[in-house]
Image (tube, rainbow, N blue to C red):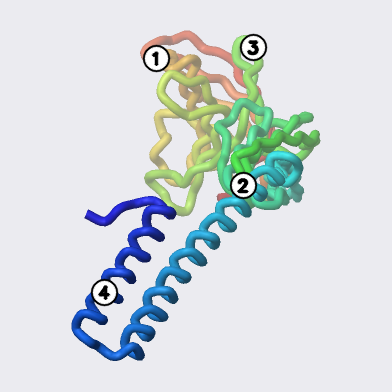
Amino acid sequence: MRPEGNKTTLLYALKSIKGRVINALSRRQLFPVFFYKLITVSAALSDKIITLHKLRLIAAFNLVSISLCLNGCTPNKTIKAQFTFLKGQGGEVVFTNQTANAAIMMWNYGDDSPVDISSPVTHTFKTNGTFKVTLTVTGKNGVSATVSQTIVVANAIVGSFTFNGKQFAGATFITHDTWQASNFDVFINDYSVGATYLRINNMPPSSNGSFVVNNGHDVNKAGYLNVDLAINGGSNFYSSLSGSLTKTGANSFTLSCTVIQRGSSIQHSVTATGTYKLM
């Protein structure tokens, strides 16, 4: 087994040289061969010593580097959140992240809508008003930052209707009529199960004029303007009996009609006003 340790290694090498000298003399080998071997072994021993010193220097440099970093070369961990926005039509606003080295983004629009995690992103505000929009970013170094800006929305696509003296307001949206592809229906508020909404079937495309509201039982007839109404969903569904709708612009209207609850003879008055955007 080869001894370990610097000093022991040196002694081992010297003993090896001594043994080779004795063997060479006993065998009457020429001295040039002996000196060649001696030089070769010495060079190998020198290489080992130089390598050891290199390792010591590298270790010392690393320790100095670590010491310097602990005392002042800590990487900059700050990040400054920034974004810009551009308003469009119908309550649409395009938001663009301007934060350098952002890895993760979260947008909060201040209107109870779900957050977004992309950029640029287009958000449609469903009501007019002032909203505090907040962007939270996380940089590639794991540090987070937040910035907020106030957005004033004045051109949202909204509508409202009054039923039994109570007003309901919300976003206005449209869909194509399921029976006549050339016609479309306008909704006020959320059209979903259990929701409260007003639907105007076969909205006239004209930009102005007054139009007769037909009986809701004729909902599937092409060109028949009629109204459906749901209050809290369930069995509270109503259909128009008669009334009138006035187009105050290409995408705006006022409505006044009488509705009747389905399965009942009770009648109610409904008024509505709103704007909408063709999809």
User: What residue is rendered at 64% in x and 33% in y?
Assistant: 108
User: What residue is rendered at 56% in x and 52% in y?
Assistant: 59
Q: Nearer the viewer, mark 1 or mark 2?
A: 2
Q: Secondary structure at mark 3?
A: strand
For the residues labelled 2 and 3, the Cα–Cα distance comes to 76 Å
For the residues labelled 2 and 4, the Cα–Cα distance comes to 47 Å
Amino acid type at mark 2: Leu
Residue farthest toward the left in the current orientation of the protein: 27
Mark 3 sits on what residue? Answer: 166
Which comes sooner in the sequence, label 4 or label 3? 4
Residue 272 can be seen, yes or no: no
**Labels 3 and 1 touching (C-beta < 8 A):** no
Tell whether 254 sits left or right of 224. Answer: right
- Residue 211: x and y in percent read 62, 39
- Residue 236: x and y in percent read 44, 14
Identify the disc placed on residue 63: 2
Amino acid type at mark 4: Ile
- Disc 1 residue crowd, few under 14, some 14–19, many 20+, Cα 10 Å: few
- Disc 3 residue crowd, few under 14, some 14–19, many 20+, Cα 10 Å: few
Q: Secondary structure at mark 2?
A: helix
Mark 1 sits on what residue? Answer: 234
- Disc 2 residue crowd, few under 14, some 14–19, many 20+, Cα 10 Å: few
Mark 4 sits on what residue? Answer: 22
Tell whether 279 sits left or right of 153. Answer: left
Q: Secondary structure at mark 1?
A: loop
